[in-house]
Amino acid sequence: MLLLLNGCGEEESECTSLETRNSVIKVFSDDSNNKLVDYAVKNSTSVEAIVSNTNTEAEKMAIWENARKSAAYRLDDTILTNSRNRATRAVSCSGLLYVTVGETTAQKQVDFDVERKADGKTSVSVHPFLF
């Protein structure tokens, strides 16, 4: 996935900027096939307790979908810069992504690239991961 952002006048894109962090989280929170949130939903005892009191498959699906939509995402404070290409103004980064559903938190390392374009905009691309 690729997101374009407006630049803030910084000389280089950075892995830890608020803009970058928010873009990475948005990629995952908007992903309808997000396996990390699926794992958290399936392992949440509070979601399971609600699901166990339903009678129909449609009600269960609605509860699971609501749990997915209400998930809380965050990137760990420590984000590593793996490489920097000054010629292309690109930075390769890694960090832990956390998703919380009810009392359950799941985490997974995410790798992403940040690149400052010639027009001053920043692009953030997230590498897909296997779960």
Image (spheres, rainbow, N blue to C red):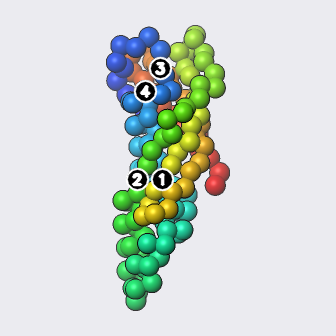
Foreground pick, 104 / 28? 104
- Number of disc labels: 4
Quadrant in which the C terminus is drawn: bottom right
In the image, is residue 20 above or below residue 60? above
Q: Are marks 2 and 1 in contact (CB under 8 Å)?
A: yes
Quadrant of res 50:
bottom left
65 vs 15, left or right, is left
Q: CA distance from mark 1 to mark 4?
A: 20 Å
Callout 3 secondary element: loop
Q: CA distance from mark 4 to mark 3?
A: 8 Å
Q: Position of residue 124 (x, y in %)?
A: 48, 31
Q: Position of residue 60 (x, y in %)?
A: 42, 78
Res 45 visible: yes
Kindly identify which residue carries mark 3.
Answer: 13
Q: CA distance from mark 1 to mark 3?
A: 25 Å
Q: Position of residue 48 (x, y in %)?
A: 47, 76
- Amino acid type of disc 2? Ala
Q: Residues within 10 Å of mark 2 (few under 14, many from 20)?
A: some
Residue at the image point whose x is 55% and y is 20% from the top: 90
Kindly identify which residue carries mark 4.
Answer: 17
* Mark 1 or mark 4, earlier in chain: 4
Callout 4 secondary element: loop
63 vs 28, left or right, is left
Foreground pick, 97 / 38? 97
- Amino acid type of disc 4? Ser
Q: CA distance from mark 3 to mark 2?
A: 26 Å
* Mark 2 or mark 4, earlier in chain: 4
Q: Are marks 4 and 3 in contact (CB under 8 Å)?
A: yes
Q: Are marks 1 and 4 in contact (CB under 8 Å)?
A: no
- Amino acid type of disc 3? Ser
Q: Nearer the viewer, mark 4 or mark 3?
A: 4
Kindly identify which residue carries mark 1.
Answer: 99
